[in-house]
Image (cartoon, grey):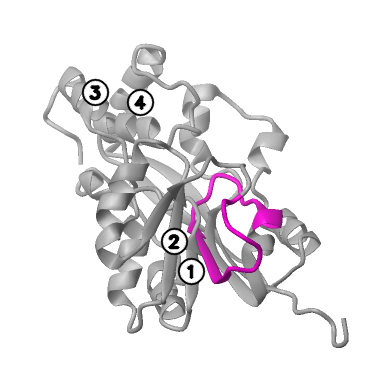
Amino acid sequence: MTSPRSFEDLVAEGAAVPVDGWDFSWFEGRATEARPSWGYARALAGRLGRAAAVLDVQTGGGEVLDGALGAAGHRPALVVATEGWAPNVPRAAARLHPHGVAVVAAEEGAALPFADGVFDLVVSRHPVRPGWAEIARVLRPGGTYFAQHVGPASAFELVEFFLGPQPQWARSGRDPERERADAEAAGLDVLPVRAERLRMEFHDIGAVVHFLRKVVWMVPGFTVEAYVDRVRALHERIEAEGSFVAYSSRHLVDARKKRPAAGA
């Protein structure tokens, strides 16, 4: 499905849409991404229904936690969320405060501002980089980390269209087995990791521009002006073929903090 609108109009719209939060509803009719078979948001709601103290790490605009709390049959006594990108913090607070959730500004990669062993459930959807030692530290013994992570070479068809072929080290980052080893080294027992690659389609260049502005690590420093030749080339390809296809990579992490040995 090609767009009757001009290249200039589509690019201008994609460049103007606000990028704060993780609400992707603007893409409806313009881009699609298949969802993992495990249904993270639904499964998260079930976990929340059995938890007492919950931490959501890198909550974005609070969209996923908000939906899961609304679907949970039981509200945990304590729910806290952290977010590291300043524009998202007030957005998440406005969304989550009605649920009684405290939102704390915490830089990605920094120590979590909580005491040891506070939470029985730590969750995250698409963290930039999981801090395994800090996750293990704030979990109670027997507590769970339940998260959906971005996997290796996610949407690299799009990345490489703009940046050219990427080195193997870039393609193999976020490897689920490496993450499993790092989690176990931090004191977590990890269930077998489920991983899937999922079809994405972009139906107009405005959707691509907005996506690259929103998911800033895909093409670092992306602006239309800096990449105008590639943006125009991709527009022409979409117009000729009807869409641009890429494949996202996702994996589900379910890990439990080890309990102290008997007598320890």
- Is disc 2 placed on a helix, strand or loop? strand
Per the image, the residue denoted by label 3 is: 11
Mark nearer the N terminus (4 vs 2): 2
Q: Which residue is mark 1?
A: 54
- Considering only order in the chain, which callout, 4 or 3, is on the residue closer to the N terminus? 3
Residue 173: quadrant of the picture: top right
Q: Amino acid at mark 1?
A: Val
Distance CA(mark 1)–CA(mark 4): 43 Å
Distance from the alpha carbon under mark 3 to that under mark 4: 11 Å
Tell me the residue at 24%/23% (across/down).
11
Q: Earlier in the sequence, mark 3 or mark 1?
A: 3
Residue at x 30% of width, y 76% of height: 71
What percent of the width, then of the height, locates residue 54? Answer: 48, 69
**Element under disc 1:** strand
Label 4–label 2 contact, CB within 8 A: no
Location of mark 4 (residue): 234
Left or right of 3 on screen, residue 19: right
> For the residues carrying marks 3 and 2, which lies nearer the camera in this image?
2
Q: Amino acid at mark 4?
A: Leu
Q: Earlier in the sequence, mark 1 or mark 2?
A: 1
Compare marks 1 and 4 and give the one earlier in the sequence: 1
Does the magenta segment cover residue 114? Answer: yes
Please state the extent of the stretch shown in magenta in the rendering: 112-134
Residue that mark 2 sits on: 80
Mark 1 near mark 4, Cβ–Cβ under 8 Å? no
